[in-house]
Image (tube, rainbow, N blue to C red):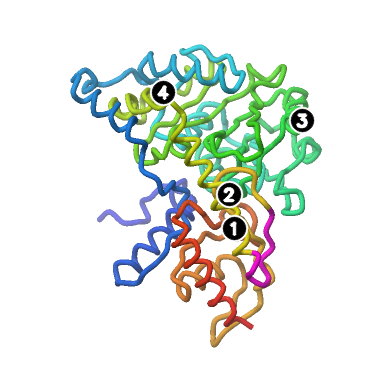
Amino acid sequence: MATPEMLSTRITNMAESATLAMAAKAREYKAKGINVIGLSLGEPDFKTPQHIQDGAKAAIDEGKYFAYPPVNGYLDLREAISAKLKNENGLDYAPDQIVVSNGAKQSIANVFQAIINEGDEVVVFSPFWVSYSALIELAGGIPVYVKGGIEDDFKATASQLSAAVTDKTKAIIFSSPCNPTGSVFTKEELEAIAKVVIENDLVAIADEIYEHINYSGAHASIGAVEGMQDRTVTVNGMAKGFAMTGWRVGYIGAPLWLAKACSKIQGQFTSANCGIAQRAAYTALTTDLAPTKAMAEEYLRRRALVKELLDEIPGFKTNVPQGAFYFFPDVSAYFGKSTGDKTISNASDLSMYILENAHVSVVTGEAFGDPDCIRISYAASEEDLRTAIARIKEALSKLS
């Protein structure tokens, strides 16, 4: 008889995605008729802009995109991505250096599978997106964390990176704007990080999926720093800036040798991304960015609202994120507090307490590398944000 003991150790040792786990828990509550406000997933609450939908519909009507696409993506889409990276980011990736995947998550998984040998180390700037560590470990690597605290806007430094590098270090990975903190690295900070990368002959994996949700005035790409073009993998996609999470279109620009390796891996795992989704992505990248800019402006307005509301909760310590759509407050002031037979020992406990008592889903910071924090998404309506934070404030007031 087949039993769970037959599962591979790589699967039994793999952590479940905390964001997806909390979303599933919230759905369980909703199924019971409980009005849960979801602030746990990193998902825009906007619909995909109409002109992008129309591009996909036109592709269906043309009837040319029903066969298997090239593994690395349609050539005209890769040309559009190449042009976007050159014009907007100062990055010179030819179309054959672009690989289109089923979301940026697959893009990152491909890269790790391509470069990591058993025991190789990858320096992860922490707090970090939950899947980085799992994907590194799945490839046989060891994540090594360098942590930025809230007092430094959660940004690790070049000197911390330098101290973390060993003879086993193969690569570094970070996001800017960052999920979960919203932190944005400046050009000067990236130049200092690049110097360490070059000196130690590393690969830099730059996750720029939140590029268009940036309030700092300028987005900087580490691949554009002198000497970094041939050692940087730039990861991006359509999910966040274009409200296209369900379309599952991500991509990389990479040195040719690495792009070919990622395409080889993808050819065995999934083959190409959906043809119609690629046509939607092509439309998004070759037409007006006005809807994207309008969404970013709305997120900025919500950031101000949520900051004001969170500042009214005793014990919450928040900074002002410069991008993405998250707050990552330090909630350690509540550790050790209790109500009835429930004691809050950590951020995971607090996240569950908030779900059970405020009926709001958030995510523990432990999953992102900081057990003192929780992640709150403000990709939600103003009404939901006001209601959710009022509920959180009331529930927390019962802890003593």
Q: Secondary structure at mark 4?
A: loop
Marks 3 & 1, CB-CB < 8 Å contact = no
Other residues around mark 4 within 10 Å, as few (<14) / some (14–19) / many (≥20) = few
Marks 2 & 1, CB-CB < 8 Å contact = yes
Other residues around mark 3 within 10 Å, as few (<14) / some (14–19) / many (≥20) = few
Between the residue at mark 2 and the residue at mark 4, the CA separation in whole angstroms equals 29 Å
Q: Is residue 120 left or right of residue 286?
A: right
Kind of residue indicated by mark 4: Thr
Kind of residue indicated by mark 3: Glu
Between the residue at mark 4 and the residue at mark 3, the CA separation in whole angstroms equals 31 Å
Residue that badge 2 annotates: 180
Which-is-in-front pick, marks 1 and 4? 4
Other residues around mark 1 within 10 Å, as few (<14) / some (14–19) / many (≥20) = many
Residue that badge 1 annotates: 365
Q: Which residues are magenta?
A: 311-319
Precedes in sequence: disc 2 or disc 4: 2
Residue that badge 3 annotates: 188
Image coordinates of residue 240 in percent, x first then y, are 47, 39
Q: Is residue 290 left or right of residue 181?
A: left
- Give above or below for 315 relative to 62: below
Precedes in sequence: disc 4 or disc 3: 3
